[in-house]
Each structure stands twice: as structure tokens, then as C-alpha cells.
Amino acid sequence: MKPKYLLLLHFLFLPLAVLRAQETNLVEISGRVTDQASKEPLPGVSVYVRGTVTGTATSLTGDFTLKTRLKFPFTLVVSLVGFQPQEFAITEPGSRLDIALVTQTLLGKEVVVTASRVEESILKSPVAIEKLDIRAIKETPAPSFYDALENVKGVQMTTSSLTFKVPNTRGFNIPNNFRFMQLVDGVDMQAATLGVPLGNAIGPTELDIESVEITPGAASALYGMNAINGMANLITKSPFLYQGLSVYQKTGVNHVDGLDAEPSILSEFAVRYAKVLKDKFAFKINASYMNGTDWRSNTTTDQNPNHLNTANPSFPELAGANNPAYDAWNKYGDENNNAVTISGVPYGGKNQTFLVRRTGYWEKGIVSPRVDNLKVDAALHYRLGDNAELSYGYRIGKMDGVFQRGNKIQLDNVVVQNHRLELRGANYFLRSYLSIENTGDSYNVKPMVDNLDITSGGANSEWGAKFKTVLQTQLSAGTDLATAMQLARQAADVGRVEPGTPAFNALKNTIRGINNWDHGKVIPGAPATGGALLTQKSRLYHTDAQWDFADRIKFANVLVGADARVYEVIPDGNNFVDFTRPIEQRTQPGGDNVYYKKFGAFAQVTKTFLADKLKVFGSLRVDYNPEFDPKINPRIAAVYTLSESHNFRVSYQNGFRFPALFEAVSYVNNGNVRRVGGLPFINEGLGYLDNSYTLASVNDFNAAVNKDVTAGLTTNEAALKNREVLQVTSLSATRPEQINSFEVGYKSVLFDNKLVLDIDAYTNVYDGFLGQVEVAVPKSNTVQVGTDEAVIAMLAANRTGQQTRYRVYTNAKNKYNNYGSSLGLTYNFYQKFTLSGNVNYNAIKTNEEKDIFVTAFNTPNWITNVSIGNREVLKNLGFNVVWRWQDSFLWESPLANGTVPSYSTVDAQVSLRVPESKITIKTGGTNLFNQRYIQYAAGPTIGGLYYVAVTLDGLLAK
């Protein structure tokens, strides 16, 4: 199917989907809504007819007028966050209602839609689900609603940049999270070719967000690929219900300690305007702009200490700061592929071999600390009678920042656009959207550093020769080994450009404009030939539909849906290539576009038993990707309501995740290590699946050979002696990742509806877990691994002339079981004082057999949050304080490995409302005591952020 035809399906089925209610004479219903306690009118109250799209909102005077052609009787629902909803039966025309809403101090009354794709009480959701509504968002001390997700039960946040944050639940966390879905009004926020979710970068503004629903745990049975670990559903405000002009300005300061940067101003401005015209037509426009100085990544942790075989364990004097094979978390160019073997050096009465790394550059000298984020969106809504609403939405975001994939990426002028067309009725929707991605002026930090080093400091062999000459000279002069290593490095680095100098800036600008990540050729006096430009362009075409037959089928509630998705990628020569070209021509930009497709459909049946106390959910989803066999994802769940206050739930589901675009068809040109997708046709002629050794075993082999050569063996003798150290990889082609998930939970409302208790426990089994393994193929794939010839070819395993290295997306050979539990409490203990908190435990069972790659659980065992607040401790004055703590844990990734220390933070805010001026002033801070911390290995160091936010809401409303 051609992608451009996918959107046309929307219009093909449009006439079939529009169901018009039987028309009668136009009925007008009017009234006024007030606060029962203060007797003051309430603006912005939602007034709608249950089971339809017909609705409106109250004006500044609390008045409303609603026109409909529905037949009598029908039910009018009146609701406002913070007040108890009310329902009214309308039986005759000419109704004039005077409604007094009561402040809602009762808890557990929220309604959610994400867990089952239909509206239901949060207490009776079949799976764990959390919700942030408008009031919770306004009361959070976090600087934005997206930051507030970090305090939600079960959520672990990864902050790559001020502009780039990624939530995760229940383990296996990575900064570009393929397993956690983010939706905004039904649109997937995953950037296709970048492979990262952009919910905070191009998603809703602070003024337009209505609520956020978080489903921790597998949701793939209903939502398909990318929801195997959980999902976040961001719901924006309807222009029919939220009218008028709103303005927001936040001014803050970070880097107050001056350690990474001078104290810096962070500014964010947002504006929203929405209007209803003649009851049928409504529109809204949003815009926001944020800029500031980013958190800096500057951790010096050495992940290649001297006791490892990839360093020099035979020479203890080279430990610590003297390690010539030093590989820092936030330094680049000093990685394993830039290891240089210095052999034949007389020392200690023998010819010794040393492993050293290129000097490289610190991240802070390569990436820009200034970031900004511009977001604009607009939507047009038109009501086709009382039972259907047609809308078109456009969203565009431009962002800078840094994110971590296999390497660090400097994002610069990245632009992502969404076009969405949706027809929605009371019991169905039909939606199509198009996402367009352009990475602008971004660049990859790793090839940037490699080519800076090589172009100005010489190729690895040239640099190594200079290093060896000076090292031998110094050692023969009696200089101690550690000092001789330092002097040799200084001599080898002569001529290398240094950050901050005009020569460095000029060369960096040249390299960032070259679309070729291979190591450049070093020609004295000639311009650089190797580059770092990240130029990725893609389109995502998606159509999905859903129909609820609850009012048409009597024996049970039946819900059905289907979706189709096509990715279209323009080959850039570095990340994605035209695979129809010969291998030697693949890395040239252009060629035939790459397509990656997925189709799915689901049905869900819900039935109540035992006088409606037991509700059983059964769903079945089928997903098909032309690269794989069809996959069936079932889910069964039940909720038993012992009473309205006690609800028990249990669920089981089997889910599949097709490899993401990057995992499937990438062909990343990364110097002398190529990262490749796992589809079998990519391997043709390369041999990494069937003719490779694991890189870990190659490194061990190299160290063993060096040791035996020092002891007097010839290199060939040493190689053949240690041939068993080499581990043949024998990889299979990538298959979909599978999860079996079991969850139990209990949610109750106690003590006269003042205490909410929510507890859940889960266990997951992953089969075919997708990850990366680095392998080495004998040069040109001309000798077969396991033979003597291949063993000899691996003698100098760290030299690019002897092997070709690949980092391959593939499936783990073992199954992995992770499990955990979480407990959440919310207690309205006195008047409007609320105490809440949650504690979360996650763990993974260790397998006895070692796998081909590290699965990277990357999750603390314990995370906890505690908050206390009062939205009105004095009239119009409220506050909230949050304490957050998480345990230390091991982080593993292709870029950096090591222990992330535990940390705790305190966030707080005080807010003042001035109702007569429609102003709210909120002042607060996150990490109030500026206790610097990191959230993942090689991630930024996060300090305190202090802010004042002013919101003007409801101006120019009707």
C-alpha cells in the first residue's frame, strides 16, 4: 500500500462513520452555575449531554446556553475539576437550570479512558493506571506538567536535556525508549528515525494540557507496538469547553552554584486562544517558546579501569589517573574502537605491549549548552450534528538539546510536524495523521570527535607511532612508566586542535557540515573528509479507527478497532541507506526510500456478573508486519468490586513488539564500528550474523595473546594457544520481542472517602529481548570464523585493518523475568490538607547462563515520593512540597556503564490566585537544596531550578 493512500482511507470511510441522531426541533437549554459555598459564578464549567459530542462551557458570569436536536429525555452532565459532578435529566424544552456545585474533597472519583480505551472509573480499571488532572498539574511544584510525571507512582524519568525527557515504567530503561508509548490526542509522539519520544518537545503547552494518564506495564494488547512497558496518554483541552485567551510566563534560574555554567535564566512563554462560533465551529491556537542553559554532562568516571583486559592489568603503576586506556563517561574519542596497540616497547627487561586510547574531547567542549524549544499548534473543530465532531489539528515543534542513543546526539533545529484529521462520535472515532521529521543542523558527537582527532592529530596508526617513539625515548632515559605515558601522549597530541580556539571552531564547523561519518583521510593542507552531520528525514503515515458497540449489543460490551502504519525514510547514508545498492555504495546519500509497515486489529469484550460486582475483560489483538509472521496478543482481566470502596483486579496478557525502525533497518556509519538493524537482508555479504566473534571475546583473546607474547611465544603460537577464548557469535535474524505479563492489584477508598489506597504487583517474562551485541568479522568476510586462519587474523584485534566491527540488533538467547510492586496512598487528613506518597519496587531475576549481550535493566530497586499540600491553606493561597528518593543502581548501555548513585530531592511551590484579575502566581523550585545528581550513566548532572510562573487565564471568554 502506498503511504499517501493510507490517509485517503480516512475519507473513504468517512461517510460510513457519520451517524446522525434523529433530528427534531432545535432545543435550547440555559442556566447558571455557581459555587455553593461562595455563591460566586463559576466560569469554565463543562456542560455536556451524556453519550454525545454536544457540550459547552460556562462564561465568565457562570452562564451557559446549549442547543441540541436530540430527542427527550437526555442527561446533562455538569463538571469542573475540584467540584463534585452533577447530572440532570432533561425531559422538556425551555429548561433553565440554576446549579450550585459543591467542592469535592472526596478522593478516587476520577474517570480514565486509557486502560480499556473506553471511559471508566479509575477505581475499577482492570490494570494499574495513574492520572494527573488539571488541578494536580496546577498544584505540582515541578516546573512543567511533563516534569510532574516523575512523581507519579511507578514512573522513572530520564532527563537527557531541558528539552528532552523520557518516562519509563517497570524496568529496562533506555533514553530512547522503544518500549514506552507516548500519545497526544491519539498521535504517537515517537520520532521515527531519531527513535525517541518527543512528548515534551513538541507536545501540548502548559496552557492546553487537560490531563495525563499513565499506564505502567504492558498495554500492547490494545495499543500495539511500542507499548510493551507502558504508555502515557496526553489529552488536550477542547476549544468547545475551554474558551478565551490564556497567557503564561515562567522565569527561572539554574546553575546557581556556578560549577558547570554561570547562573542562567530559563524563560518559557506560552499563549492559548480558543473560540466557539455559532455553536458548531470552534478553533484553538497554541504557541510557546522556552530557552535556557542546559544541564551539562561532565562525569569523569572511568569505565575502562586498569584491571580490565582492555587496559593494562599487568602494570599496576598505570592505575587510576595514570591509566593510558582511560575511557570516561563524558569524554569521546577514547572508546574501544580508538584503542591503539603499542607493541615491542623495551621495559622491565622484555618487549612489552601496551593498550592506549586516543585522548578525545570532553562533551562540554563539543555540545552547545544553550537550548530552546518552539511549539505551535492549531486545531479546527466542527460538529456534524449532536453525535459527530470533525477536527483537524496541526502541530509543529522546533527543538535543540542533547540525547543519548548508542552515542550522544547534539540536536540543533530539529523540526517535527504532525497533521491530524479525526472524526469522532459518542461511540466511535476514525483518525489519520501524518508525522514529518527533519533533524536540521544536528550532529553525532562520536564521529565529530573522531574526525576532530584524526583530521588535526593524525590517523590512529600515525598517532600511535609518535606515541611509541616518545614512550621508548623516555623509558630508556629512566623516566618512570606513568610519567613516560603522559609525556608520550603530550607529544602525540601536538597539533591537535583545542576547544575554544579559532582553529577548533573552524574545523568543528567544517566537520558538522559533512554528511559522512567515516573516519576521514588525513591529507596535510587539505580540508577534512570525515563528517558528523545528522541529516535524517522521515514520514510516518497512520490511520486507526475504533467502534464501541455497547449500545447495540445487549449481552456484553464489545469494542473493536484497527490501525495501519507506514514509515517512509529518505536514506541519508549514515543511519539509513538504500539496501538495493551494492555494499560499497550504500553509504552514499539518496537512493530508494525505505519503507517499514505494520497493521493491526483488536476486539475487546466486557461482561459483568454477580449483580455487576464482577467485571471481566477479554481482548485479542492481531498485528502484522510484512517482515515477520502475524502475532496474536491476548489480554484477559477482571475487576471484583466487593463494595464501592474495595476493588480487586487481576490481568494477564501476552504482547509482542516488532523491532522499532532503528532496530530493524538502520545501517549506522560510525567510523570503524557499524551499527546495523536486525533484518536478515542487511547481513547479506557482511557476515556479522554467521561469521563473527563477540567483541568481548576478541578483547579477552587479544589480552591473552599479548601476555603470552611477553612470556616468549611467537604471535602465531600465542594466537593458536588461545583460540578457545574466541567465542563464535552464531546470531539469528531478529524476531519480535515477546512479553508475558501478569498483574494483580487492589484499590480502595476508606475513611469516609478521604483515603485512597492503591497497590499492585506484577511479573513479566521477556522472550527474545531485543538488544545490541558488538561483534568482529574477519576483514572483508573472506575467512571463516573458527578456523586457524581466522584465529591468526584476530591477532591485532583492536586494529581496524584486521577486522570489521558491527554492533548488531538481535534477540537475547535467554528469557528474562522481572517483577515488582508499588503502593500509593492519598489522604485528605484535615480540611484541604492532603498527604500522598508512593513507593515502588522493581527487580530482575538473574540468569545462570550468560547471554550474548547485557540486557540493561537500568532501574533502581526502590523509588519513593512523598508530598504534602493544601490548595487553599489561606483564601486563594496554596502550597505543595514533594520529597523524592531513588536507590542506586547499575546502568548498562553501549555508550556508558557504571553505578548511578542514589539521590533525593525536595521540590516545593506556593501559589496565589487573584480571581478578580484572573491571575495565578506560582513560585517554587525543584531540587531546592541543589543536591547535584545524575539519572543515568553519561547523563547530565542536574541541579536546582528556581522559578516564578504567572498565568492569566480566561481572558476574552464569552
Image (cartoon, helix red, strand yellow):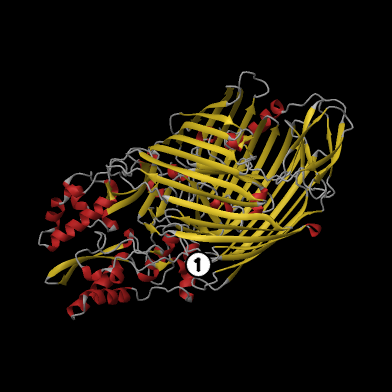
- Which residue appears at 65% of the width and 24% of the height? 550
- Which residue appears at 19% of the width and 77% of the height? 475
Where residue 630 sits: x, y (%)? 46, 28
User: Taking 782 as reference, is 404 left or right?
Assistant: right
Q: Quadrant of the N terminus?
A: top right
Which quadrant of the structure image shows residue 268? bottom right
User: Taking 578 as reference, is 198 left or right?
Assistant: right
Q: Residues within 10 Å of mark 1 (few under 14, many from 20)?
A: some
**Which residue position holds label 1?**
509
| 292 and 61: which is toward the camera | 61
Relative to residue 727, is residue 463 depicted above or below? below
User: Which element type, helix, strand or loop, lies under badge 1?
Assistant: helix
User: Taking 253 as reference, is 591 left or right?
Assistant: left
Where residue 496 sits: x, y (%)? 38, 73
Which quadrant of the structure image shows residue 921? bottom right
Where residue 734 sits: x, y (%)? 38, 38
Which quadrant of the structure image shows residue 492? bottom left
Where residue 90 sits: x, y (%)? 82, 30
Q: Amino acid at mark 1?
A: Asn
Relative to residue 867, is residue 100 depicted above or below? above
